[in-house]
Image: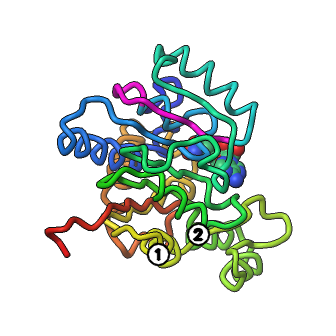
Amino acid sequence: MSDPMRPRASLRTAVVWEVLQDALDRRVKATGRETLDVLDTGGGSGNFAVPVARLGHRVTVVDPSPNALFALERRAAEAGVADRVRGVQGDAHGLFDVAERGGYDAVLCHGVLEYVDDPAEGVRNAVAALRADGVLSVLAAGLGGAVLARALAGHFTEARHALADPDGRWGEGDPMPRRFTTEQLTALVEDAGLRVTAVHGVRVFADLVPGVLVDTEPGALDALLKLEATAAELPAFHSVATQLHVLGEFERADEV
Ligand SMILES: C[S@@+](CC[C@H](N)C(=O)[O-])C[C@H]1O[C@@H](n2cnc3c(N)ncnc32)[C@H](O)[C@@H]1O
């Protein structure tokens, strides 16, 4: 899904996209259906929804922002997938006013739990939207990555503030309402009734590396992408990732 005009954009999405694509492929094989029904809660302007639709799936995007939905419509049309992307105004708490309970093979909840009033309810609703055997994909801001970034920028007091703050914010000026540790995010998914089947650290190095190193050194972007992909798998690096990605799936009867 990387944008050839903006190669560095792939650093933000590559790890999540690989994991998500693989999870969707597994659902296709398991269901025997080529076209899955996917719900993207807080899907915004379609960073993930449009590429998922390009794989051939039907995507419903629920988002409170009319501007984001307008941009989504335009982007889906430009990508030639307008017939497979439906944007509806709504939010994670009133999800079933606009989305079908138990109606989706996959639910995406990317970059949303940071903003909702009640993350636990947001995840419970996302899980309730899944069909039996569906898969949940959650992406959220990681605490450790923000602490590291503030410290490396010389903002040591802010870094320490984020460590002690219940929402992981570094101060009043922090634009991020909430961040999560791996333990907090996986607990939200498990408490909603799913088994965590994968955890990945996203943007472990990308936000710390000076842009000039990536943009001018031949092959550097590719090497950094490979480094990110390898580190994403390693729990030691999850605690310093800018974002955390968690996959949740229902316990299979033969595993209980
Ligand atoms: C950081 S953007 C993420 C967009 C997209 N999911 C992505 O990964 O690119 C956060 C999105 O969450 C939406 N949002 C904010 N509050 C929400 C809520 N209570 N329920 C659902 N979406 C919400 C915003 O409108 C925005 O589109």
Task: Residue 120: give its label.
Answer: 2
User: Is residue 226 rendered magenta in the image?
Assistant: no
* Residues drawn in magenta: 53-63
Q: Secondary structure at mark 2?
A: helix
What amino acid type should be assigned to the residue bearing mark 2? Ala
Percent position of residue 207, x then y: 56, 55
Q: What residue appears at the point 72 percent right and 42 percent down from the top-left corner?
A: 64
Which label is found at residue 191? 1
Residue in the image at 61% along x and 27% along y: 72
The answer to whether mark 2 and mark 1 are in CB contact below 8 A is yes
Q: Which mark is residue 151?
A: none
The correct choice, above or below, for 6 with respect to 220 in the image is above
Q: Earlier in the sequence, mark 2 or mark 1?
A: 2
In the picture, measured across the screen, residue 180 lies left or right of residue 178, that is: left
Quadrant assignment, res 103: top left
Q: Mark 2 to mark 1: distance in Å?
A: 8 Å
Residue 212 showing in the rendered view: no
Residue situated in front as seen by the camera: 127 or 221: 127
Where does the image place residue 223, in percent across and percent down from the top left? Answer: 34, 46
Q: Residue at x 38, y 59 (%)?
A: 247
**195 sits to left or right of 216:** left
Q: Residue at x 69, y 33 (%)?
A: 68
- Disc 1 marks a residue whose amino acid type is Asp
Q: How many marks?
A: 2
